Amino acid sequence: MKHREFYDLVSDILRSDEFRQMKSHRHHVKSNTRDHSIKVAFLCYLYHKKFSPNIDRRELVRGALLHDYYLYDWHDRSPGTRRHAIAHPRRALNNALKKYPDLTKTQQDMILHHMFPLTPIPPQTRAGWVLWIYDKVAAISDYRRPTSHIHVHRKDRLEK
Ligand SMILES: [Fe+2]
Ligand SMILES: [Fe+2]
């Protein structure tokens, strides 16, 4: 597998029921929160390899994968989805901490501040800014074409 290293860093998250169910949560018109999160995490992984090997790779990639771990479809407009844009980083962090209580302070920063400036506090860490950038890049990409057209989303291969 071309990116076996990436898979090894996140395989437990990818295989979990909670993460799999994100596939049914629509996101950015042509995508879903699962595919979007994989795209963001993979872009962070590539960034790390190319430009910033000093960032902890595992910390960066796992934090990125969990950044939208809010676990609902915000299009449903149910009471729990109100103020989604500004509320979902906190919801994602709470869910992630329940499932992965060993999240580092850097990963918590990544998740909690990825929607800056919609939320007032910017990322406090370099990893947080890396996620911030690639979340935007991935969101634009999501609107432009389905994730399946992008080689990082050979999900079936990643899941084996
Ligand atoms: Fe988000
Ligand atoms: Fe996102």
Image (cartoon, rainbow, N blue to C red):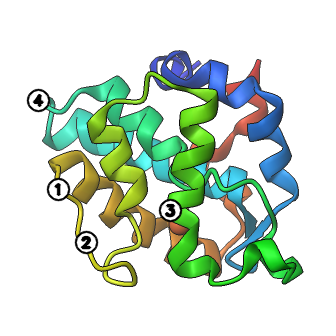
| Viewer-proximal residue among 2 and 132 | 132
Circle 4 sits in a helix, a strand or a loop, which is it?
Answer: loop
- Mark earlier in primary sequence (2, 3): 3
Q: Is residue 75 above or below residue 97?
A: below
Picture coordinates of residue 131 (x, y %)? 34, 55
Q: Mark 2: give few (<14), some (14-19) or many (20+) Cα within 10 Å.
A: few
Question: Does any atom of ligand 1 lie closer than 8 Å to the CB of label 3?
Answer: yes
Separation of residues labelled 3 and 4 (CA atoms): 26 Å
- Mark earlier in primary sequence (4, 1): 4
Picture coordinates of residue 82 (x, y %)? 71, 82
User: In the image, what residue type sits under mark 3?
Assistant: Pro
Residue at x 33% of width, y 63% of height: 132
In this figure, what is the number of numbered marks? 4
Q: Read off the residue under disc 4.
A: 54
Query: For the C terminus, which image quadrant?
Result: top right
User: In the image, what residue type sits under mark 1?
Assistant: Gln
Check if mark 1's residue and mark 2's residue have beta carbons within 8 Å.
Answer: yes
Say the numbered circle drawn on residue 65.
none
Q: Mark 3: give few (<14), some (14-19) or many (20+) Cα within 10 Å.
A: many
| Viewer-proximal residue among 48 and 104 | 104
Circle 2 sits in a helix, a strand or a loop, which is it?
Answer: loop
Residue at x 78% of width, y 51% of height: 22
Q: Is 125 placed left or right of 108 in the picture?
A: left
Q: Read off the residue under disc 1.
A: 124
Mark 4 or mark 1, whichever is nearer to me? 1
Check if mark 2's residue and mark 4's residue have beta carbons within 8 Å.
Answer: no
- Mark earlier in primary sequence (3, 4): 4
Q: Read off the residue under disc 2.
A: 121
Separation of residues labelled 2 and 3 (CA atoms): 12 Å
Picture coordinates of residue 34 (x, y %)? 71, 50
Separation of residues labelled 1 and 2 (CA atoms): 8 Å
Say the numbered circle drawn on residue 89.
3
